[in-house]
Image: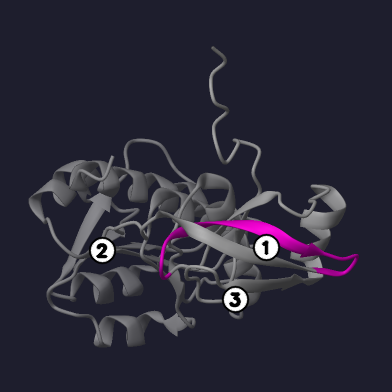
Amino acid sequence: MAATPAWPPDSTPRLFVETPLSDAAAVAIDGGQAHYLAGVMRLKVGDPVLLFDDKTGEWLAEASEVRKRDLTLTVAHRMREREAVPDLWLCAAPIKKGRIDWVAEKACELGVDRLVPVLTQRTIVDRPNLDRLRAHMIEAAEQCGRTALPSLAEPVKLAALLADWPAERALFFADESGGVPAAEAMRARPGPAAILVGPEGGFTPAEREVIRACPAAVGITLGPRILRAETAAAAATAVWMAAAGDW
């Protein structure tokens, strides 16, 4: 007896939508997403599509109308609830285009709850393109099967970030001058946390002193090798996730 094919198949396209999803909801798709489904994936009426909205989880829908420039998807049923997200913020100084996009992608893939661009004295990019960063996070979530997206904060100056820092949230900052081994520090401070990573060239000595003065701050080291800013952000996040038991 032949095995029943898995449904939906592994090749089913997966999209993030802003529309809140529910049973039998009709979702209008246009623009680039419509081109992708109709033009690239050759979607036909009755074909399945997986949708998620960052609020209600992942849903299976079917194409009910397919036109050249737009289409309509009808939601069939929920496949998964929205995933639980570890309470970790990544506070990263914006770096050159391409590299900061990569940080946004990896923040989403690794499970960060909130991405905060932090402006420091050595920051080269003082106005990161938030729409582009969010687009990179959405693409990462679509490809990696995530049902939740990191929230994206407005850029904030380092002094303002520290002035309003919540006392209950540990602040692990990548200290180029040395600190506690990251895994050791993170296991010793469970609970809500944030990782603070500087720009190319790192924090200035004055900035490190200001950070250390924050009661929640813990300087950490990420090993004996010098890491680029984007690598440090991903490495520190991975260490925290492992220490928190999310992996």
From the viewer's perspective, is 46 left or right of 82? right
- Residue at the far left in the pictured view: 188
State the extent of the magenta-drawn residues as a range. Answer: 55-70
At x 39%, y 44%, the residue is 235
First in residue order: circle 1 vs circle 3 = 1
Q: Please rate how many residues cluster around mark 2, counting C-alpha atoms within 10 Å: few if below 14, some from 14 to 19, many from 20.
A: some
Q: Is residue 34 left or right of residue 98?
A: right
Asked if residue 129 shows in the view, the reply is no
Q: Are marks 2 and 1 in contact (CB under 8 Å)?
A: no
Identify the residue position indicated by label 3 in the image: 130
Q: Which mark is residue 87?
A: 2
Q: Which mark is residue 97?
A: 1
- 64 relative to 89 in the view: left or right: right
Q: Which mark is residue 4?
A: none
Image coordinates of residue 236 in percent, x first then y, are 34, 49
First along the sequence among labels 3 and 2: 2
Task: Inspect the image, locate mark 1, and give the three-letter code of the amino acid beneath it.
Answer: Lys
Q: Secondary structure at mark 3?
A: helix
Residue 176, position as x, y percentages in the image: 35, 53
- Residue 147 belongs to magenta span: no
Residues packed near mark 3 inside 10 Å, few (<14), some (14 to 19) or many (20 plus): some
Occupied quadrant, residue 159:
bottom left
Mark 2: secondary structure:
loop
* Quadrant showing the N terminus: top right
How far is disc 3 from disc 2 in space, using C-alphas? 21 Å
Tell me the amino acid under the disc marked 3.
Leu
Number of numbered labels in the structure image: 3
Q: Amino acid at mark 2?
A: Asp
Q: Residue at x 44, y 61 (%)?
A: 202
